[in-house]
Image: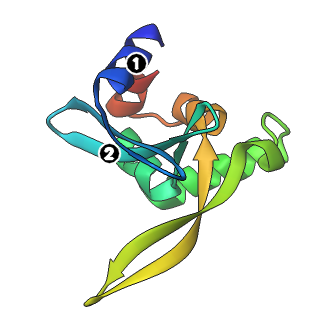
Amino acid sequence: MKEQNNSIEQNRQITTTGGEIILYQPDSSIRLEVRMQDETVWMTQAQMSVLFGCSTDNIGLHLKNLYEEGEINAVSTTEKISVVRQEGKRLVVRKLLHYNLDAILSVGYRVSSINATRFR
């Protein structure tokens, strides 16, 4: 985990008023911009699917099971964060559900992929 924190720290890009945006690139096949806010990393299900090399359906299933089994708490591990996205020719603000590092790590231990093993 210490190596992971070091690579995240080395890849910091820009700061916004809502938290820092961090570029995480463990190798040439993965490149993610993630939000650092309230002393934790926040990712969407789509970002986790890229990180772990699996589908968003797989990520959603693991999250559902983690919450149902009580391994993690949805209230303390999720937050809706406004994100500006380009849709067609216009910029649109959408509130997307983000998951903190506790949820990301919990999903990472359940996903069976080379990328998930590397991230752990």
Q: Is residue 58 above or below residue 40?
A: below
Q: Which residue: 61% across, 30% down?
A: 39
Answer with left or right where residue 28 lies relative to residue 35. left
Q: Which residue: 18% across, 40% down?
A: 29
- Rounded to the nearest angstrom, the CA distance separating label 2 from label 1 is 14 Å
Image coords of residue 111 (percent x, y) = 50, 37
Residue position for label 2: 32
The residue type indicated by label 1 comes to Gln
Image coords of residue 4 (percent x, y) = 40, 18
Residues 65 and 36: in front is 36
Answer with left or right where residue 118 lies relative to residue 29. right
Q: Is residue 87 above or below residue 33?
A: below
Q: Quadrant of residue 113?
A: top left
Q: Quadrant of residue 73?
A: top right
Q: Secondary structure at mark 1?
A: helix
Q: Residues within 10 Å of mark 1 (few under 14, many from 20)?
A: some
- Residue found at the far bottom of this picture: 89
Residue position for label 1: 4
The residue type indicated by label 2 comes to Leu
